[in-house]
Image (tube, helix red, strand yellow):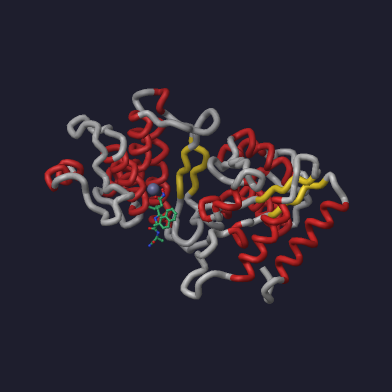
């Protein structure tokens, strides 16, 4: 999208001419939503003439294609739902390929690509990084390696170690390590809290519900965390959780608070985020998943598609959900 109306369209025509001159060719357009947003959605000022002319030029060029043109046009976006439907008509961008977040093996392969650009030390463990980064995208994984390389450079090391990679994950998720001056008394409380998380998990009566601990630390990280205990998953990513597995996650989340209570008779403001996490799981179990025996199957959350946000159930049900 250019400053002057029509310049973008001229550039598009130019691009397709170049592709024709050197076919077979692939034209790859990144962030297509910048020009491909649904037309007439230009905000209070109405449409965006330059954007529309640019996209129209692209559609016109593609309409001229035949099977033998020898040009493939590929476009990428994170916001396929906002694109103009005209873009997706047959003969245009008519095939959608959804690229989701990579799985464990995919993350390992992507990490290996980025790691090939830096020198890894003998103890560097890409698989461990892949295990700690469930649900993360390629761009995120690139950032993990970038952060790890920066840490190694700052150490004056000539290769990236296992610890650099581990701290790279922390920097890209919860935030960098911070040195706070903490009293021994507070350090002990943090250690007891984090141990509580780990133990609640390891002491599960059912061995199959015990999860390996990815990482536990009492070094403060990010904007406010004094420590954390990160639970892992033994084999690969988790796609489904049974009710027992969710209850085990609740146990894990509550372990820190319980440990504080056992040692001090009360807990602190610290477990606020643990409670928030546990509450979200418990609410989902009851309101979305029918996992409360008393309440049964109905979904009792507000219907997100209701324009007025109405609760489809009476207040007595709300009371039961709460209980
Ligand atoms: C505060 N922080 O805000 C102090 C500095 C109970 C030993 N006055 O549950 O650090 O109280 O298992 C990501 C994740 C802030 C960002 C958790 C930012 C929690 C964290 C509040 C450990 N570990 N609590 C925990 C904690 C706090 C907070 C976070 C975050 C504590 C607890 C923070
Ligand atoms: Zn905690």
Seen as rendered, the residue at the extreme right is 21
Residue 209 lies, in percent from the top left, at 40, 27
Write the residue at 36% across / 35% down.
Answer: 200
Write the residue at 82% across / 53% down.
Answer: 19
Looking at the rendering, in which quadrant would you find the C terminus?
A: top left
Q: Is residue 129 visible?
A: no
Residue 130 lies, in percent from the top left, at 61, 39
- Between 238 and 211, which is closer to the camera in this rendering? 238
Write the residue at 38% across / 30% down.
Answer: 245
Write the residue at 78% across / 56% down.
Answer: 16
Q: Is residue 242 left or right of residue 170?
A: left
Q: In the figure, 71 relative to 246: above or below? A: below
- Between 179 and 142, which is closer to the camera in this rendering? 142
What is the total number of numbered labels drawn onto the structure image?
A: 0
Residue 115 lies, in percent from the top left, at 73, 45
Q: Is residue 91 left or right of residue 45?
A: right
- Between 23 and 205, which is closer to the camera in this rendering? 23
Q: Is residue 106 visible?
A: yes
Q: In the figure, 94 relative to 13: above or below? A: above
Q: Is residue 273 left or right of residue 48?
A: left
Q: In the figure, 71 relative to 38: above or below? A: above
Q: In the figure, 69 relative to 41: above or below? A: above
Seen as rendered, the residue at the extreme left is 316
Residue 12 lies, in percent from the top left, at 74, 61
Looking at the rendering, in which quadrant would you find the N terminus?
A: bottom right
Q: Quadrant of ligand 1?
A: bottom left
């Amino acid at each position: 999208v250019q400053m002057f109306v029509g310049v973008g369209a001229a550039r598009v025509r130019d691009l397709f001419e170049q592709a024709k001159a050197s076919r077979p060719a692939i034209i790859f357009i990144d962030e297509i939503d910048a020009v491909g947003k649904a037309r007439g959605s230009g905000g209070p000022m109405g449409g965006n003439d330059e954007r529309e002319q640019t996209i129209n030029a692209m559609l016109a060029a593609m309409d001229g294609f035949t099977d033998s043109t020898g040009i493939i046009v590929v476009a990428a976006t994170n916001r396929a739902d906002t694109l103009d439907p005209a873009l997706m008509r047959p003969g245009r961008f008519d095939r959608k390929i959804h690229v989701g977040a990579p799985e464990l093996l995919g993350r390992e392969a992507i990490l290996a690509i980025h790691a090939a650009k830096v020198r890894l030390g003998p103890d560097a463990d890409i698989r461990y990084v892949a295990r700690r980064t469930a649900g993360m995208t390629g761009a995120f994984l690139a950032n993990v390696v970038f952060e790890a390389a920066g840490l190694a450079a700052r150490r004056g090391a000539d290769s990236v170690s296992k610890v650099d990679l581990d701290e790279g994950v922390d920097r890209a998720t919860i935030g960098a390590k911070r040195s706070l001056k903490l009293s021994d008394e507070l350090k002990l409380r943090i250690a007891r809290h984090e141990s509580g998380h780990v133990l609640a998990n390891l002491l599960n009566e059912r061995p199959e519900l015990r999860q390996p601990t990815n990482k536990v630390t009492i070094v403060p990280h990010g904007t406010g965390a004094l420590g954390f205990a990160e639970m892992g998953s033994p084999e690969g990513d988790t796609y489904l959780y049974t009710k027992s597995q969710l209850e085990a996650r609740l146990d894990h989340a509550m372990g820190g608070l319980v440990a504080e209570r056992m040692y001090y008779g009360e807990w602190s403001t610290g477990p606020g985020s643990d409670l928030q996490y546990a509450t979200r799981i418990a609410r989902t179990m009851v309101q979305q998943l029918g996992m409360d025996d008393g309440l049964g199957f109905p979904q009792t959350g507000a219907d997100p598609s209701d324009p007025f946000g109405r609760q489809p159930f009476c207040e007595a049900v709300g009371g039961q959900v709460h209980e």
